[in-house]
Image (spheres, rainbow, N blue to C red):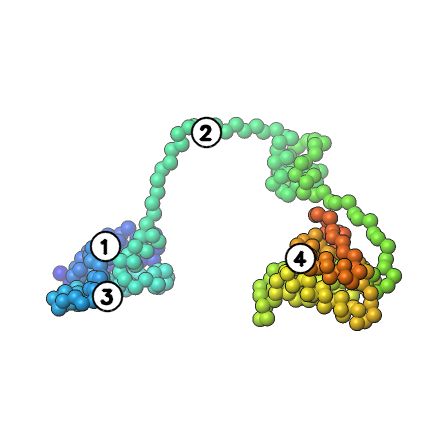
Amino acid sequence: MDVSRLQVKPLSGESDWPLWRYKFKFVLNYHADTLEVVEGKLQKPSQPHEGANEATLEKYKKDLMCYKKANTCAMMVLTNSMTEETMQKIIRFENGREVWLELHKLFEVHMEVLIPNNPIEVNLVTSDDSLLQLYYERWGHQDKRHMKSLLNHELNIQVNIQDELCEACIYGKAHRLSFGSRNNCSSHGELIFADVCGPFDKSFRRFQYFVVFKDQFTKFRYVFFLKQKSDVASALQEFLAYATNLDHIAKEVIGANREEFDKKEVRMFLKKKGVVERFTAPYTPEQNGGSEREIGLLLKWPEY
């Protein structure tokens, strides 16, 4: 039998798979033990245990040589009968069995018809009001007057506007009331805003957080990089020591209501310095607006 006369189109996709698999089994079966390798009937023999007799070692070498020869033949036949695009998907495999299984996963489709046990009934009601609400929700809750005009001119659909409140718009478009402003400070260090931002990807020096201290009087900011949130205490001590060296007296520190500020080490240090510590109310970042705005600016600048 001249196997070269059997024309097998290179495998390129799902449409070629059924006929390609049918023909290819004949090609594999022509070569000794090749079909057995891809079907998993012939596998790589297990290495004999240490101290095995000569006959066992000889049989192992013979079986291993037979497997390697059949597997090499299977790999050559398989890879020579597929496109480069298909080969890129199986290039990570080293034996014919794995390649054969992967080809089945890639190109063999398993379908099953599912029939629901209980019949499904769908009731549709169409009216002007529901139609307007449908397009109103589909098009991002725009002004209903604009929606009415658009439906009339573009789709020739006449609808009536009903004065109904949209619950989604109430929750999604509502804004919080503005906070009142406080009196401006009259001296350096009178009011300090503090907040922590992170975590970020670790830097070369293993920093992944930073803390911002902002003086309300001068609007000057100080940034300290941290390896962990617990380093806030040491950063605060360093900042207040620097302020004291400049003859600035810190009187009050406002920090976010989080554990890195509300800890015994920070409270004791500020108490010894005579500095008042205050925390923001829950879900009220506006009370710490100075540091919040600075963090927003610091995160925005790298984008430019």
From the image, tell me which residue sits under label 2.
Answer: 120
From the image, tell me which residue sits under label 3.
Answer: 72
* Residue 80 seen by the camera: yes
Chain-order first, disc 2 or disc 3: 3
The N terminus appears in which quarter of the rendering? bottom left
| Residue 79 image offset from top left, x and y in percent | 29, 63
Q: Secondary structure at mark 2?
A: loop
- Residue found at the far left of this picture: 55
Please tell me in which quadrant of the rendered image residue 60 appears: bottom left
* Residue 300 seen by the camera: no
Q: CA distance from mark 2 to mark 3?
A: 55 Å
Instruction: Name the mark nearer the viewer: 2 or 3.
Output: 3
Tell me: 118 left or right of 139: left
User: Within 10 angstroms of label 3, few (less than 14), some, or many (20 or more) residues?
Assistant: some
| Residue 175 image offset from top left, x and y in percent | 73, 45
Chain-order first, disc 4 or disc 3: 3
Q: CA distance from mark 4 to mark 2?
A: 56 Å
Please tell me in which quadrant of the rendered image residue 206 appears: bottom right
Q: CA distance from mark 4 to mark 3?
A: 63 Å
| Residue 7 image offset from top left, x and y in percent | 23, 59
From the image, tell me which residue sits under label 1.
Answer: 39
Disc 2 and disc 3 in contact, CB within 8 angstroms? no
- Give the numbered dot on residue 260: 4
Q: CA distance from mark 3 to mark 1?
A: 15 Å
User: Within 10 angstroms of label 2, few (less than 14), some, or many (20 or more) residues?
Assistant: few
> What residue lies at 70% left-to-right and 47% top-to-bottom?
283
Q: Amino acid at mark 1?
A: Glu
Q: Secondary structure at mark 3?
A: helix
